[in-house]
Amino acid sequence: MSVKMIVVGSVAYDTLQTPKGTRERALGGSATYFSTVASYFTKVGLVGVAGRDFEPAHIAFLKKHGVDLEGFEQVPGQTFHWSGSYGDDFGDATTHATHLNVFEKFDPKLPAAYQKVEFLFLANIHPSLQLKVIERVKKPRLIAMDTMNFWITGALKDLKKVLKKVDVLFINLQEALMLSGEKKLNSAIPALLKMGPGRLVIKMGELGAMTATAKTRFFTPAFLLPSITDPTGAGDSFAGGFMGCLARDGDLTENGFRRAMLYGSAMGAFTCEHFSLDTYKTLTKAKIEARFKALKTMIAVK
Amino acid sequence: MSVKMIVVGSVAYDTLQTPKGTRERALGGSATYFSTVASYFTKVGLVGVAGRDFEPAHIAFLKKHGVDLEGFEQVPGQTFHWSGSYGDDFGDATTHATHLNVFEKFDPKLPAAYQKVEFLFLANIHPSLQLKVIERVKKPRLIAMDTMNFWITGALKDLKKVLKKVDVLFINLQEALMLSGEKKLNSAIPALLKMGPGRLVIKMGELGAMTATAKTRFFTPAFLLPSITDPTGAGDSFAGGFMGCLARDGDLTENGFRRAMLYGSAMGAFTCEHFSLDTYKTLTKAKIEARFKALKTMIAVK
């Protein structure tokens, strides 16, 4: 099966503390979460870099999920390491340390097969790297990107160049206001669309997420979990479910994107149920479909 | 046609400034907005008080909508007068002056016919008055209430007594966190339900509104208006559409409440399109049904 979608992003080890416990050097990183989640929907390739310390068990985990690793490199040095903690309300994480290590000089390599992928996801990395990847891929059906406040304040010029070339922008509510310079979402949406992407996916944490185009709006609630264990990677998992659904079904109509939003919400919630990527040690496609149906019921009105 | 629902709340004149213009002594007040909106759905009675300055044209406006005024009094003195302004982002209003006038000594009178209504809406008035009204009405099918930060900080003891006796609490997101003492909505919801109401309607401004019970959540987006003129009364109009739908259809199942949420969202948006209650000078039932359908389409997924 040839690779239909690739993700370019980080591979990391996370040391973290949540109200439910602590984990040291747990598997993490945007590309890791995205590709693991998307693997339930399509053949996905991971473009990323790790250090020599990256454990064979974690390579095996990705391979077991069918994640293609032709664009994944291991180089001398240590893997990107983030440490942080979450308070009782599971709000924004407090970062204690960020060691970029080998990720600092990350230069995405695109194997020949990856240059013809249909779906491209640019996880939250430096806009200049995102741009480089876009230039190396030949007209994919859909390019989506994620970004964050760090690049909005630190690399706005490059970020604006990337925005002109993507179809879908993933961004959280606060950053949507920051990037657009607007105070209200209703003003931020047209301002962001003017920057390039034809569609926005605006993440609103525990409230859920909205997708917007110039003419449409669609909101999906967050799936209601009895309890959260670790919200790390929830956004990348949302994107993995969203893009995975699109790649699997190939339906880029408004209804197709709405289905993608529900799968995104389902996958974001699955990730929060356990530490790190532990959910995906046992998750089945049947459980994903059941949660998709539950979300559909949550929003249904006769 | 006998009165099926009553609202107890304020009748006011509003002097206001929005980015779209200014109005002096425009018709306003929670009971006025609620009853005018609900009149499109059911026979509604307004329990409220105005001063001798209340204009015959405004009485005629309410009567023309079929609002029952048996519980409406005019007494010596001036009508409640609020003045405020909205900034460019149409966020929270800045209050310039509040003259309670005759509203200060408001003592709701319930005509005999009103004591047997099926639906009761307690608009945002002092909790002790809300309590008085509840005691005078004989087992309605549904009691809903609104409240605000002013009573949460100033009359919490009475407010908690009312909460024990109502079925539905209307509250905005910020106040839901304040009243529950929680930082996140997911924790606030069970805390508020524990205080009494079996259902919450949490208003989130431009994002829309959510209704929650112990077991269900349902989100309705705000209807997307090309432009807003005056958001005053949007919350009371939402409640009027919500309760109006319930009174008209009599469907208190989860699906019935979801339909009510969509009608609420539709009516809140209608109110914002023009100053004061001007929308309702020309609004037709056909336009309401068209907007309800548009909202249904906004949230539909196949």
Image (tube, coloured by chain):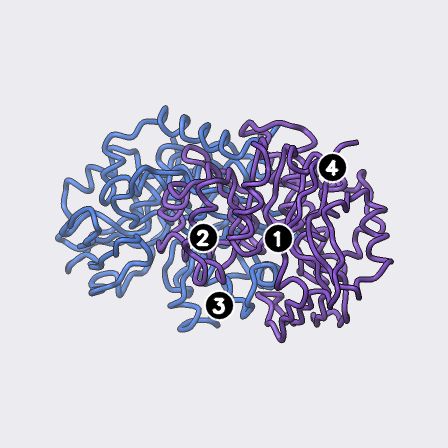
Chain colours: A purple, B blue
- Looking at the rendered image, the disc whose residue lies closer to the viewer, 4 or 3, is 4
Q: How far apart are marks 1 and 3 (CA)?
A: 28 Å
Marks 2 and 4: which is nearer the front?
Answer: 2
Residue B17 position within the rendered picture, expressed as x and y whole percent measured from the top left? 19, 54
Q: Residues at badges 4 and 1 in contact (C-beta under 8 Å)? A: no
Secondary structure found at label 2: helix
Q: Residue at x 48, y 48 (%)?
A: B209
* Subunit ID for the residue under disc 4: A
Q: Mark 3 lies on which chain?
A: B
Of the two numbered discs 1 and 2 on the same chain, state the one appearing first in sequence.
Answer: 2
Kindly identify which residue carries mark 1: A235
Q: In this view, does A189 lie to the left or right of B53?
A: right
How dense is the environment of label 4, judged by Cα within 10 Å: few (below 14), some, or many (20 and up)? Answer: many
Check disc 1 and give the amino acid type. Answer: Gly
Q: Do the residues labelled 2 and 4 touch (CB within 8 Å)?
A: no
**Is B78 situated left or right of B262 in this image?**
left
Where is residue B189 shown, x and y percent of the image? 58, 58
Marks 1 and 3: which is nearer the front?
A: 1
Co-location on one chain, circles 4 and 1: yes
Which residue position is annotated with label 2? A158
Q: Total number of numbered labels? A: 4
> What residue did someone put label 3 on?
B178
Mark 1 vs mark 3: same chain?
A: no
Residue A41's disc is 4
Question: Mark 2 and mark 4: span between their CA atoms?
Answer: 32 Å
Query: Please, which residue is most extreme toward the top here?
Result: B286
> In the drawing, does residue A101 fall left or right of residue B296?
right
The residues bearing labels 1 and 2 have C-alpha atoms spaced at a distance of 22 Å
Residue drawn 25% across the image and 41% down it: B277
